[in-house]
Amino acid sequence: MLRDITLGQYYPGESWIHRLDPRVKIIAALVYVAALFIVDNLIGFAIALAALAAVIIISKVPLSFILKGLKLIFLIIIFTVIMNLFMIKGGDVLVEIGPLSIEEKGLYTAFFMAARLILLIIGSSMLTLTTKPISLTDGIEALLSPFSKIGVPAHELAMMMTIALRFIPTLLEETDKIMKAQQARGADFESGNLISRAKSLIPILIPLFIGAFRIAHDLAMAMEARCYRGGQHRSRMNAMKLSGRDAAASVMLAVFLAAVIVIRIVL
């Protein structure tokens, strides 16, 4: 299950999406997330789904690999749907279960919340799946660089965000190893009530934190040994340059956002 998390992983490829400038992809991801909170009708969600499907097809990232990332949030989606079904009131009563009832507005809200969560997770994952960590760092730094004039450490923030994303798979792999080692020693993580299960996680969390600090220390030592100096005077082997495909992607992004806004206003 822990290996099913796709956030932070990079899927190698040479597609049109992979070759886009990281700055364009970061802005596109932010615009897409914002658009998901703008849409509030079936047509708007259909456009958002179609745009995401087009990106997935062009990127040639297997759909099965992308959908693996939904397994760990499946319970959250189900919980959100149930809460909205029974807590949101309005419209005709569709189903009555004792003191609880499902009404039209609750069903409507539950459906859109589930759709919004699914599209949000997949859309965010596409950014890391199609962008190398070093390119993601350069893109974030370039977008934050205007704020460096007011004292914002653009390079440091970009580096921290990228390292955090990069080490999500590493920490998950470390967690999996610790769990298997504890299970080999007779640990039980599945039986008992909620409190006992939470207590059984202590033998996992302590070595995991120690391992995380060790990885961070090793990474810092490796960067210092290579005389790494980021920020203003850092040189890059591949300079970022906007190309024709980036301009085309920007136009399509603007059309998508305009369509979402118009549909929200009209409908």
Image (spheres, rainbow, N blue to C red):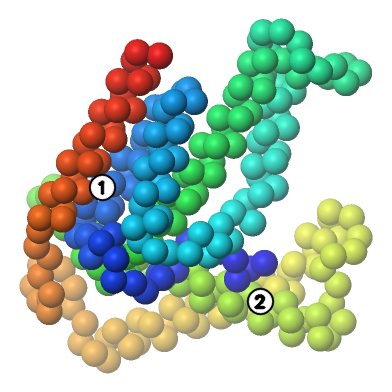
Q: Nearer the viewer, residue 34 or 199?
A: 34
Q: Nearer the viewer, residue 141 or 79?
A: 79
Seen from this angle, which residue lies furthest bottom?
225
Quadrant of the rendering where the C terminus is positioned: top left
Whether residue 70 sits left or right of residue 164 in the image: it is right
Disc 2/disc 1 C-alpha distance (Å): 34 Å
Answer with mark 2 or mark 1, whichever residue precedes in sequence.
1
Whether residue 21 sits left or right of residue 123 in the image: it is left
Q: Quadrant of residue 233?
A: bottom left
Q: Quadrant of residue 51?
A: top left
> Which residue corresponds to the image point at 37% horizontal and 19% vertical from the top-left?
264
Q: Position of residue 30 (x, y in %)?
A: 32, 44
> What residue does disc 2 label?
176
Q: Position of residue 118 (x, y in %)?
A: 54, 44
Query: Local crowd at mark 2 within 10 Å, few (<14), some, or many (≥20)?
Result: some
Q: Amino acid at mark 1?
A: Ile
Quadrant of the rendering where the N terminus is positioned: bottom right
Q: Amino acid at mark 2?
A: Asp
Above or below for 75 versus 177: above
> Which residue corresponds to the image point at 41% horizontal and 41% vertical from the top-left?
50
Residue 95 visible in the shown view: yes
Q: Label 1's element?
A: helix
Which mark is on residue 108?
none
> Which residue corresponds to the image point at 28% horizontal and 60% vertical from the top-left?
17
Number of labels in the image equals 2
Q: Label 2's element?
A: helix
> What residue does disc 1 label?
27
Callout in the foreground (2, 1): 1
